[in-house]
Amino acid sequence: EVHLVESGGGSVQAGGSLRLSCQASGFTFADSAMGWYRQAPGKSCEGVAAIDIFGSTNYAGSLKGRFTISRDDPKNTLYLQMNSLKPDDTAIYYCAADRRGYDLALTPNEYNYWGQGTQVTVSS
């Protein structure tokens, strides 16, 4: 059974940092592209960042430079380092897996597996 479990969310003041983790099991993590998505109240799901099996990355334009996606294949773990956080970053953050390991598209319907999400709240 596939599991993606996010952790590391919480409440932080604007300008602060958080590091999200996503522990994966039940599928071949090293063969899968991985992504982070977020959904704010009243808004649609938004792609944040993606990383393929080669370590190539793709970011939503507005987030590049503040967020960094990385992966540790031996640990089956995906990370998202978030710096200089803003109130607009407040959302539930989800990790997702795409069995097509080369895919860097930030398109939610191309991902096969999803976690339950972790809440990130940034106060001004």
Image (spheres, grey):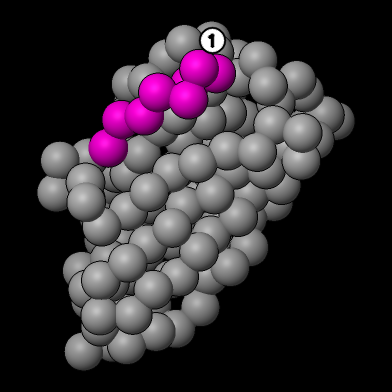
**Residue at 43% of width from left, 58% of height from top?**
81
Quadrant housing the N terminus: top right
Q: How many circles with numbers are drawn on the protein? A: 1
Q: Residue furthest left?
A: 62
Measured as percent of width and height from the top left, residue 96 is found at 54, 35
Q: In the visual, does 79 lie left or right of 49?
A: right
The reply to whether residue 110 is visible in this rendering is: no
In magenta segment, residue 89: no
The one nearer the camera, 47 or 29, is 29
Q: In the visual, does 9 lie left or right of 73?
A: left
Going by the numbered disc 1, the residue's amino acid type is Arg
Q: Secondary structure at mark 1?
A: loop
**Residue at 58% of width from left, 68% of height from top?**
8
**Residue at 39% of width from left, 73% of height from top?**
17
The reply to whether residue 68 is visible in this rendering is: yes
Q: In the figure, residue 110 lies in which quadrant?
A: top left
**Residue at 33% of width from left, 44% of height from top?**
48
Q: In the figure, residue 101 lies in which quadrant?
A: top right
The one nearer the camera, 124 or 18, is 18
In the image, the segment drawn in magenta is: 52-59
Measured as percent of width and height from the top left, residue 59 is found at 27, 37
Measured as percent of width and height from the top left, residue 83 is found at 32, 67
**Which residue position holds label 1?**
100
Measured as percent of width and height from the top left, residue 76 is found at 73, 37
Determine crowd level at label 1: few under 14, some 14-19, many 20+ residues with C-alpha closer than 10 A.
some
Is residue 67 placed above or below 72 in the rendered structure? below
Magenta stretch, overall SS: loop
Is residue 120 placed above or below 70 in the rendered structure? below
